[in-house]
Amino acid sequence: MFVIIFALSAISNVHAATLTGTITVGNAPWGIAYDSAKGEIFVANTGFYAHSANNSVSVISDRNNTVVATIHLPANPYNIVYDPRIGKLFVTTDTGRIYVIADSNNTVVANISVGIIPSDEAYDSAKGEIFVVDGDLSTVSVISDRNNTVVATLTIPETVSGGSGPDPRGLTYDSVKGEIFVMDWNDNMITVISDRNNTVVAKIDMPSNARAPIYASYDPAMREIFVTCTGHMVYVISDRNNTIVANVDLNRYQVYPEGITYDSAKGEMFLADTVTNNVTVINDSNNTVVSNLGLPTVDNSASPMFLAYDSAKGEVFVTNNYIGTVSVISDSGASATTGNLIVNVKDSSGGVLSGVAVSSTSQPSGQSGLSGTTGSDGLVTFSNVATGAYTLQASKSGYVTGAGTGSVAAGSSVSVSIALQTQSSGGGGGGGGGVPGFPVEATVLGIILIVVVLSARKRLSA
């Protein structure tokens, strides 16, 4: 025990993450989401430890960390995801329905039937879709935020013959690749779904000692997925080739990680441990533990479950399921002033294009022009660039030059997709037609000139 205490004390001095407050919410808070437009935190209260169901969502203002509203639902809520495109929150419940809440007035504006007991969800910013996993049905439902309808349902295939079948629990969205990573803890497998056509494109076998992947968070700066397992392990997967590139063994800290969130300002992962009532912090540059913060408990238990990162305040909000509170942790870092810009270039059929020259044609004041070339994955990343709007140009021989726009926010990464059309045989970057090797306009002018010359010769011969 002495060794463990000493280790925790040593790493706590390295990182200055500190507990700054505790907020009382409803009974058994579970899922949590940050509303970047309103500067509010939404908390799902499941009511597991109450004599009657709580069925509510607490709204916390990050200005003073107080509950400013309570939204009552007709069913027990589990998880929450925020859709910034339309300013709405999607809440899963134990009745197989998702309730849609407008953050403008904190009212329920729609409900969607998706399965039996949908658990985790992820927001796909490129498609404006919400992916919802249902462990009982082994499905992932895809909801369009344009009309709140299910546009696709995928069944997670069984991979272990004779086993108890897949049981997907958590999932996360890869904003660079446009893919969803689904944690299947029964089959010890991660399923990768492409949002292009909502099909399974890869399977990642977890090590036999991984003891079930459960939740995950995506790190766009490193292009890695951090996966918590029900044992003491966190696995790091590169989205470049869907392989495990590192693991963080938390056994010496006796940490059992569950919920996880990414701190974009510090480049760190915050993990909740329901067993030891700790929040563990991992640095994404070297995959090492830099802090292990104990939370206040009641009857020796707080059971921290899920986390949300508030990028405006540099704070992490953690739901304490057993004691009905939310802990507020400061990452003690200066507010981020730059972000990352990731350009994804594809051809007209959606295939990746390497060797494409990408440059900025306009950028924020004080930011020098950007210039780079896409790699074998069709991507080029510009790190630590100034916040603001960018216009980008992509060009490659044999393709019509394309353009795209994106806006970089402090402490975050934005992905810009540019599709290039193949040049016609006419060349010149224009449309088809004309004489080969010349654009249409030049061909027309040539024809006119020939007609004029022939007409002049005819008049002279007469």
Image: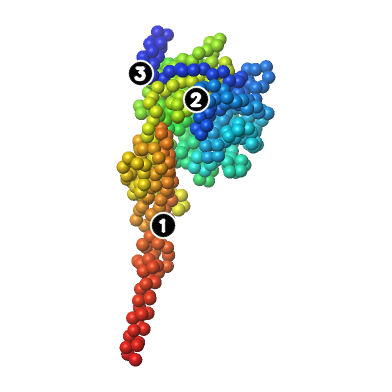
Quarter of the image for residue 410 reads: top left
Q: Residues within 10 Å of mark 2 (few under 14, many from 20)?
A: few
The residues tagged by marks 2 and 1 sit, at their Cα atoms, a distance apart of 51 Å
Q: Which mark is residue 14?
A: 3
Instruction: Label 1: state its secondary structure.
Output: loop
Q: Position of residue 217 (x, y in %)?
A: 47, 30
The mark closer to the camera, 2 or 1, is 2
Q: Which mark is residue 63?
A: 2
Q: Which residue is mark 1?
A: 422
Q: Position of residue 220 (x, y in %)?
A: 42, 35
Q: Position of residue 57 (x, y in %)?
A: 60, 26
The residues tagged by marks 1 and 3 sit, at their Cα atoms, a distance apart of 53 Å
Amino acid on which disc 3 is placed:
Val
Residue at (47, 41) in percent of width and height: 178
- Tell which of 158 and 321 is nearer to you: 321
- Which colour scheme appears in the figure? rainbow
